[in-house]
């Protein structure tokens, strides 16, 4: 009987121990770090003081807090002096007589490519809150300098009529191009398209990155930072003046909206 009681005691003790080991729930470690996704593809909508850009990014998630990415983008620059204005009156026989940028002689677009690195300072693996990080990028740039055309009035009084013609800024057309009374409207976008000049350069960015739900499948982030571009020649967007010489470089602060998906 004594031995029977002893055996029963050890059986119940063993079952109790097994129950604790096998069935007791184990608390989850919310701080576990690890690469959950391998890649991400995103789109950028960027605004800066003198223009805008749209970009496409392909990223490789190296570790939980580090991503290497490649970026391809197109943007447009605007000279701070550029302002749209309208004629004080409308003339019925002229095509949409209206707005134009007085003094503008070229439109400037840029194609940019770069390789960059994004590193999170806070823990990217957290499911809630905002992950904060910083990023940098450098790569080539290609400037597209397109002549800006204006439609100006042509006096055909000998034939009893007025017409318009599209002209661009040259030394020969300077007086008429800058005569506000002669301007009807800005030219069509297609005018000057095949006269676009290509200007090589280099570009770079550095910014602070705020990612809402960095652990999520869908990317929702905002970025603020500084960007710079340097080209091999001066970029003339407005008619030359002594007080505003043309420069071969641009420096801007920007705000960037970042959307996409991780896999």
Image (cartoon, rainbow, N blue to C red):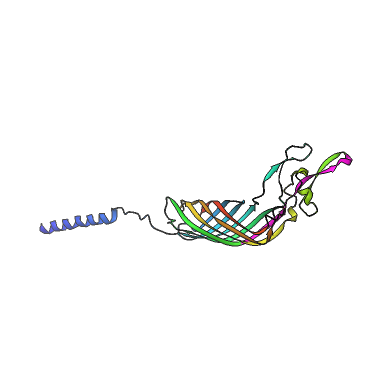
Please provide the residue range marked out in magenta.
Answer: 140-159
Residue 8 % position (x, y): 16, 56
Q: Residue furthest right?
A: 158
Which image quadrant is residue 31 in? bottom left
Residue 109 % position (x, y): 66, 54
| Residue drawn at (53%, 53%) of the image | 224
Residue 141 % position (x, y): 63, 60
Give the dominant element type of the magenta stretch: helix, strand or loop.
strand
| Residue drawn at (68%, 60%) of the image | 234
Q: Residue furthest front?
A: 243
Where is 75 relative to 159, above or below?
below
| Relative depth, front residue between 179 and 252 | 179
Is residue 252 among the parts visible in the rendering?
Answer: yes
Q: Is residue 72 left or right of residue 263?
A: right
Residue 235 % position (x, y): 68, 57
Which image quadrant is residue 230 in? bottom right
Where is 12 relative to 95, above or below?
below
- Magenta-colored stretch includes residue 115: no
**Number of numbered labels in the structure image:** 0
| Relative depth, front residue between 237 and 35 | 237
- Magenta-colored stretch includes residue 145: yes
Q: Is residue 244 left or right of residue 260?
A: right
Which image quadrant is residue 160 in? top right
Is residue 263 among the parts visible in the rendering?
Answer: no
Quarter holding the N terminus? Answer: bottom left
């Amino acid at each position: 009987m004594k031995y029977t009681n002893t055996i029963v005691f050890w059986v119940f003790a063993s079952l109790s121990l097994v129950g604790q080991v096998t069935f007791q729930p184990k608390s989850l470690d919310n701080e576990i770090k690890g690469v959950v996704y391998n890649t991400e593809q995103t789109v950028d909508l960027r605004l800066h003081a003198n223009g805008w850009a749209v970009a496409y990014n392909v990223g490789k998630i190296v570790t939980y807090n580090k991503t290497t990415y490649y970026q391809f983008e197109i943007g447009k620059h605007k000279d701070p002096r550029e302002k749209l204005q309208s004629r004080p009156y409308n003339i019925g026989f002229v095509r949409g007589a209206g707005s134009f940028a007085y003094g503008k002689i070229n439109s400037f677009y840029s194609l940019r490519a770069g390789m960059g690195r994004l590193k999170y300072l806070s823990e990217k693996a957290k499911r809630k809150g905002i992950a904060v990080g910083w990023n940098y990028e450098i790569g080539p740039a290609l400037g597209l300098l397109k002549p800006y055309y204006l439609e100006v009035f042509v006096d055909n009084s000998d034939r009893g009529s007025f017409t318009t013609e599209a002209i661009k800024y040259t030394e020969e057309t300077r007086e008429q191009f800058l005569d506000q009374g002669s301007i009807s409207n800005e030219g069509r976008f297609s005018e000057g398209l095949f006269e676009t000049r290509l200007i090589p350069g280099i570009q770079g960015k550095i910014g602070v990155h705020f990612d809402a739900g960095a652990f999520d499948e869908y990317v929702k982030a905002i970025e603020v930072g500084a960007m710079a571009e340097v080209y091999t020649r001066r970029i003339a967007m407005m008619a030359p003046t002594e007080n505003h010489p043309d420069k071969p470089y641009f420096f801007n602060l920007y705000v960037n909206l970042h959307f996409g998906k991780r896999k």
